[in-house]
Image (cartoon, rainbow, N blue to C red):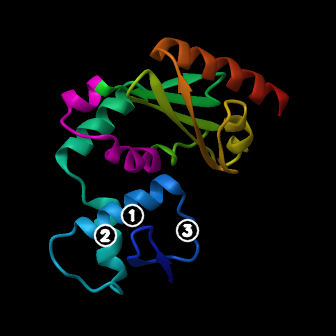
């Protein structure tokens, strides 16, 4: 374990083998500092449970909804799902629940790229790309985004259908170039 200082100055311990990207960092920060009781920061089992297993029912509803809308393209090389503002409202949850969903879906076997489209205000979609085999940072850069080789993202303006169409077109081109 190593110490990581969060933006608000609080320090948390994280496993040295895991790199936390911006959304995961926010997720970890929210989990650690929303716990209502004190706990032993060196208790790995308790930390694992709080971070990865304990879920609110609203989060599980979001996961189920997003999984039910999962679509596969290009001989199952791309898996894509969409979360709209109406979904978040209907399921009584917020965008803060999406990092756990992305983490869950990133374990999908036999796909090259996972894409999660999450609607934000003013016609903007926050796009998360994940992969275990494909450089999705290069893919995100096609949309002006970036990140890490296997975890990246971008923001795209437009309607759900136009954003999805852009992602499908660029992803098809990108996967064909590999």
Q: Which of marks 3 and 2 is in front?
A: 2
How far apart are the two marked residues, 3 and 2, measured between alpha carbons?
A: 16 Å
Tell whether 22 sits left or right of 175: left
Q: In this view, does 169 lie above or below 17?
A: above
User: What segment carries the magenta color?
Assistant: 86-104
Q: Which mark is residue 32?
A: 2
Image coordinates of residue 12 in percent, x first then y, are 41, 77
Query: Which mark, by number, is residue 28?
Result: 1
Badges 1 and 2: C-beta atoms under 8 Å apart?
yes
Furthest residue toward left? 36
Q: Where, by quadrant of the figure, is residue 46 drawn? A: bottom left
Which residue in the protein does label 3 denote?
Answer: 18
How far across and down, in percent of the image, does residue 24 sit?
46, 57
In magenta segment, residue 4: no
In the rendered image of this protein, does residue 48 appear above or below residue 82? below
- Asked whether residue 111 appears in the rendered view, the answer is no
As displayed, is residue 140 above or below residue 168?
below
SS label for mark 1: helix
């Amino acid at each position: 374990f190593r110490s990581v200082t969060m933006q608000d100055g609080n320090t948390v311990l994280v496993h040295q083998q895991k790199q936390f990207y911006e959304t995961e960092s926010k997720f970890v920060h929210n989990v650690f500092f929303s716990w209502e009781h004190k706990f032993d920061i060196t208790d790995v089992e308790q930390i694992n449970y709080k971070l990865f297993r304990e879920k609110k029912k609203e989060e599980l509803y979001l996961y189920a909804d997003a999984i039910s809308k999962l679509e596969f393209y290009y001989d199952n090389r791309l898996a894509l799902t969409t979360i709209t503002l109406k979904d978040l409202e209907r399921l009584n949850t917020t965008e803060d629940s999406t990092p756990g969903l992305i983490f869950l879906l990133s374990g999908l076997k036999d796909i090259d790229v996972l894409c999660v489209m999450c609607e934000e205000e003013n016609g903007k979609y926050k796009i998360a790309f994940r992969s275990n085999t494909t450089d999705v940072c290069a893919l995100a850069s096609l949309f002006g985004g970036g990140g890490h080789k296997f975890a990246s993202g971008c923001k795209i303006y437009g309607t759900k259908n136009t954003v999805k169409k852009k992602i499908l077109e660029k992803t098809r081109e990108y996967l064909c170039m590999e």
